[in-house]
Amino acid sequence: MPLLDSEMPADPIALFDEWFREAAAAGARQEEAATLATADAEGAPSARMVLFKGLEDGAFLFYSNYASLKGRDLVHDRRAALVFYWFVTHHQVRVAGAVRRLGRAASEQYFATRPRGAQLSALASRQSKILRSRQALEERVSELAERYPDDVPLPREWGGYALRPRWIEFWESREDRLHDRLRYVLRSNGAWRIERLAP
C-alpha cells in the first residue's frame, strides 16, 4: 500500500503504533528490537540492538546499564537515533531526538516485571567492561542468587531512558526500489510537518 500524504495521521506516534501492531500480528520476530545509535565525546558513532519498551508521552522507552558504552555516550551527547525494521511487513521506522533518563521509581517498576534471571544478570554484569572469564560472571550470578533469594534489588547503575523524537521517518518498500519515505519533523509549536523524501 502506498503512503499517501493526504491519508497520514497528524501525529506520527499513531502511525508508528499501527505499524508496530501490524508487524506483531504478521509474525515479526522480536518486533520490539531496534538499533540504537549514539556517539561518544569525540563524535565516534556506535550502534547496538536494544528492546523498545513502550511509549510515554510520545517518547520511546528502553532500558540499560547507565555505565555501559551507550550510557557513557549519552552522558556526553544526549542525541541518539533508533531504527526499527520489520521484514515481514516491509516497513522501517527511523527516530531521532534527545534522550533523558527515567526516574528511579519508573525504573524500579519496570525492573520488577523482568524475569528473575534477567534481574540477576543485570545486577551481576558491569556492562561493557572487560571480563576475567565467563566462569567469573556465572559465579557472580550464583552468589547474587543466594544473597537475594526473594526480591532482586535494582542495580544502582541500571534504568530507563526516554528518547523524545525531533523527527520520525516512515519507509515502505515498493517495486523497482521506488520506496515511499515520509518524514515527520517537529515544529517549534509542537505540531508535526510531513515531508516526502526521495527513496
Image (cartoon, rainbow, N blue to C red):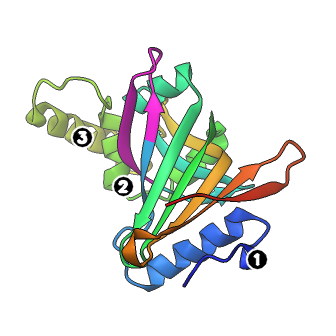
Q: Is residue 74 left or right of residue 104?
A: left
Bounds of the magenta span?
37-51
The local secondary structure at tag 2 comes to helix
The local secondary structure at tag 3 comes to helix
Q: Return the mark for residue 141.
A: 3
Residue at image position (51%, 81%) is 22
Residue at image position (38%, 59%) is 115
Image quarter where the N terminus lies is bottom right
Q: Most extreme residue toward the right, as rendered?
A: 189
Can residue 59 be spotted in the picture? yes
Q: Looking at the image, which is closer to me, 66 or 146?
A: 66
Residue bearing mark 1: 6
Q: For residue 50: magenta? A: yes
Q: Looking at the image, which is closer to me, 130 or 41?
A: 41
CA separation, marks 3 and 2?
A: 11 Å
Residue bearing mark 2: 116
